[in-house]
Image (cartoon, rainbow, N blue to C red):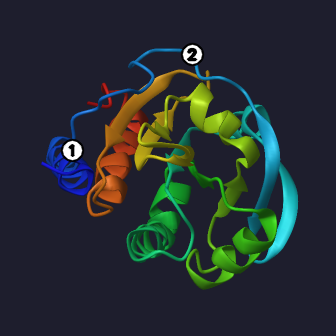
């Protein structure tokens, strides 16, 4: 078997495993989340994003995605943009994280995120590593993983799947359960 065939089989197995929603590497439920500050963009404008400051306003849906303007990442951003009013009504803030540069994210925040939520730049994959969200086959790129973080900085919910389809629905349900005083999972 040649290297290309082996790589395709490995990626296929990884996709099958992750599309089931199982998490290979992620912060555990109840774990304290690492604080970070980084450049971000919303509605085409760059600003300094602070997780600590954002958590002081309520829970945060922190989602990692591989690359701006790819089909799956654009679809996921559109889905989060459509659901942002529901998250906001529950007191939650949505923020996406990728290794894209801030200039790319300024455009992505307008075109894909529809000016609804911020996307943060993770230069050097520092944040991805803190959250066990780096793609193991390409560590400078994010895996597709979503966290719901309580205002106290604890992991309430985590979902990992290469498919962008269930991230919004699952994290919204987790925030609704948190708001109702129930366990997120």
Q: Mark 1 vs mark 2: which is more N-terminal?
A: 1
Q: Which picture quadrant has residue 185? A: top left
Q: Residue at x 38, y 19 (%)?
A: 29
The spot of residue 88 in percent (x, y) is 56, 58
Q: Is residue 79 above or below residue 18?
A: below
- Judging by the rendered image, the residue that carries numbered circle 1 is 10
Which residue in the rendered view is the most extreme toward the front?
A: 2
The spot of residue 116 in percent (x, y) is 62, 72
Q: Which picture quadrant has residue 120? A: bottom right
Q: Which picture quadrant has residue 20? A: top left
Residue closest to the eye, 67 or 5: 5
* SS for dot 2: loop
In the figure, is residue 69 to the left or right of 75?
right
The residue carrying pointer 1 sits among few (fewer than 14), some (14 to 19) or many (20 or more) residues within 10 Å by Cα, namely: few
Q: Is residue 5 above or below residue 175?
A: below
Which residue in the rendered view is the most extreme toward the bottom?
A: 111
* SS for dot 1: helix
Marking on residue 32 = 2
The spot of residue 170 in percent (x, y) is 29, 49
Residue closest to the eye, 88 or 12: 12
Q: How many marks?
A: 2
Q: Residue at x 49, y 37 (%)?
A: 133
Residue closest to the eye, 156 or 17: 17
Q: Give the CA separation, mark 1 to mark 2.
A: 32 Å
In the figure, is residue 124 to the left or right of 156?
right
């Amino acid at each position: 078997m040649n290297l290309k065939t082996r790589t395709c089989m490995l990626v296929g197995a990884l996709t099958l495993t992750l599309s089931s929603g199982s998490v290979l590497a992620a912060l555990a439920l109840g774990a304290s989340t690492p604080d970070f500050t980084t450049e971000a963009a919303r509605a085409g404008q760059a600003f300094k994003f602070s997780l600590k400051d954002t958590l002081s306003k309520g829970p945060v849906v922190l989602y990692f995605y591989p690359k701006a303007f790819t089909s799956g990442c654009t679809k996921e951003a559109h889905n989060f943009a459509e659901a942002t009013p529901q998250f906001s009504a529950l007191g939650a803030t949505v923020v996406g994280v990728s290794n894209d540069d801030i200039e790319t994210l300024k455009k992505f925040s307008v075109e894909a995120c529809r000016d609804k939520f911020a996307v943060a730049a993770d230069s050097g994959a520092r944040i991805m590593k803190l959250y066990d969200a780096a793609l193991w086959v390409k560590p400078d790129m994010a895996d597709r993983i979503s966290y719901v973080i309580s205002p106290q900085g604890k992991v309430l919910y985590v979902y990992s799947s290469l498919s962008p389809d269930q991230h919004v629905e699952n994290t919204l349900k987790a925030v609704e359960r948190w708001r109702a005083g129930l366990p997120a999972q």
